Image (cartoon, coloured by chain):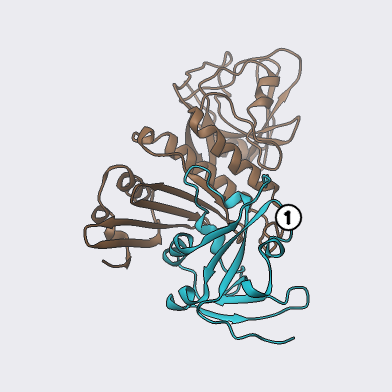
């Protein structure tokens, strides 16, 4: 399967047209999907370069995996949603065929409006996806202590973390996180199980991901706190939470001792 | 405005939006105990000068958590009364709110008022 080079398209900025009634346009780094007639086509696959789409009816962001070079739009559907990063954006492939424009709008991932997902995420995660989306509704001073509105970048990153979690091989062992907006405009994840507690905090704008992990061991509590510098470190922390010992991640940084 | 001396045994009230209540664990989020953005201060009310309902602004979307001033002081925080015109009970807990300290505050706090309406 051939794929359009996104950089080439962005350079010439000409609308790129489907053979049928779907039309792709490009502005800046966003692809716009337009419907020219009433016919509908499937527009998802799991093996293509990811593109960020904009739903023209609502101007909401739609994250899908697309293959705009195929005249028939081959579809290789994933068994479950998965995600990849592109231009620091999150793309999600859905395991459900999308065959009409109405369906496209129903899977829009828009956090400044209503956030609606398909039924393909594990059901246990749907609530947390929606909750993150709703954080965008929080207005300045939402806590009456001067909190800032939740930053769009924070919402992006929170959704990205959730999707990485969905794609993680140990996902089924990980509890659904509790997510909370931060007065700084960031978002925080919390997991708690028995003696273990893991907190991830997204700082607004900076894309910094902080962590705090604590566990009780034989002779007291031990805590570590710091910044996550790579996806590998994130996986190390998640792995610790489901099956490891705090010693597995203590090298990340110790702030509290036994 | 008269400034009160806050004793270690004094209760401090912190307003907590419903969105910070974790129904699964029955606990509140550590995010409830953050400093006001750009400052080293976390606003609280001196319990003996107010009521939980006033701290919650009589808004059913907010609850109130209470902890002892002495607990904050034992964790390197300064606690002082800072009355303002619209809230004579207003006080500050000054100091860095590390994740570790916020987690301890969650464990230490007592919920004295629960929200009765959803925030979102």
Residue B87 is at least partly visible in this image: yes
Residue A88 is at least partly visible in this image: no
Q: Could you say which is closer to the camera, residue A82 or residue B98?
A: B98
Q: Secondary structure at mark 1?
A: loop
| Residue B2: percent from left, percent from top | 71, 87
> Toward which corner of the image does residue A18 lie, by quadrant?
top right
Q: Could you say which is closer to the camera, residue A6 or residue A182?
A: A182
A210 is higher (above) or lower (below) than A60: below
A5 is higher (above) or lower (below) than B114: above
B12 is higher (above) or lower (below) than A109: below
Q: How many numbered tags mark residues here?
A: 1
> Subunit of mark 1?
B
Q: Quadrant of the C terminus of chain A?
A: bottom left
| Residue B101: percent from left, percent from top | 44, 67
Q: Which residue is mark 1?
A: B59
Residue drawn at x 45%, y 67% is B98
Q: Which chain is cyan?
A: B
Residue drawn at x 64%, y 38% is A30
Q: Could you say which is closer to the camera, residue A55 or residue A176?
A: A176
The hue in which chain A appears in the rendered picture of the protein: brown
| Residue A41: percent from left, percent from top | 63, 15
List the single residue furthest toward the left.
Answer: A218
Residue drawn at x 72%, y 64% is B54
| Residue A189: percent from left, percent from top | 49, 49
Q: Could you say which is closer to the camera, residue A216 or residue A9?
A: A216
């Amino acid at each position: 399967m051939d794929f359009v080079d996104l950089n080439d398209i962005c350079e010439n900025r000409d609308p790129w047209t489907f053979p049928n009634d779907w039309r792709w346009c490009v502005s800046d780094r966003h692809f716009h999907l337009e419907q020219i007639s009433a016919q509908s086509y499937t527009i998802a696959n799991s093996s293509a370069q990811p593109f960020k789409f904009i739903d023209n009816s609502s101007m909401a962001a739609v994250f899908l995996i697309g293959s705009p070079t195929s005249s028939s739009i081959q579809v290789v559907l994933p068994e479950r949603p998965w995600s990849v990063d592109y231009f620091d954006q999150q793309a999600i492939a859905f395991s459900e065929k999308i065959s009409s424009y109405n369906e496209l709008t129903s899977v829009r991932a828009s956090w400044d409006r209503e956030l609606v997902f398909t039924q393909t995420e594990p059901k246990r995660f749907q609530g947390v996806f929606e909750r993150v989306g709703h954080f965008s509704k929080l207005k300045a001073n939402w806590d009456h202590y001067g909190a800032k509105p939740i930053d769009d970048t924070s919402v992006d990153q929170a959704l990205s973390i959730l999707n990485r979690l969905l794609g993680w091989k140990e996902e089924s062992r990980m509890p659904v996180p509790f997510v909370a907006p931060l007065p700084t405009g960031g978002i925080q994840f919390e997991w708690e199980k028995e003696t273990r507690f893991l907190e991830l905090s997204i700082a607004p704008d900076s894309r910094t991901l902080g962590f705090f992990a604590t566990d009780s061991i034989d002779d007291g509590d031990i805590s570590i706190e710091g910044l996550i510098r790579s996806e590998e470190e994130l996986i190390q922390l998640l792995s610790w939470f489901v099956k490891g010992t705090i010693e597995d991640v203590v090298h990340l940084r110790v702030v509290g001792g036994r | 405005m008269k400034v009160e001396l806050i004793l270690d045994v004094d209760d401090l009230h912190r307003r907590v939006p419903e969105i910070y209540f974790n129904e699964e664990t029955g606990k509140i989020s550590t995010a409830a105990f953050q400093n006001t953005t750009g400052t080293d201060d976390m606003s609280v009310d001196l319990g003996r000068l107010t009521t939980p309902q006033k701290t919650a602004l009589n808004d059913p979307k907010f609850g109130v958590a209470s902890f002892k001033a002495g607990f904050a002081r034992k964790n390197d925080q300064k606690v002082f009364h800072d009355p303002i015109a619209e809230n004579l009970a207003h006080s500050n807990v000054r100091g860095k709110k590390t994740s570790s300290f916020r987690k301890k505050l969650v464990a230490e706090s007592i919920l004295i008022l629960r929200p009765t309406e959803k925030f979102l």
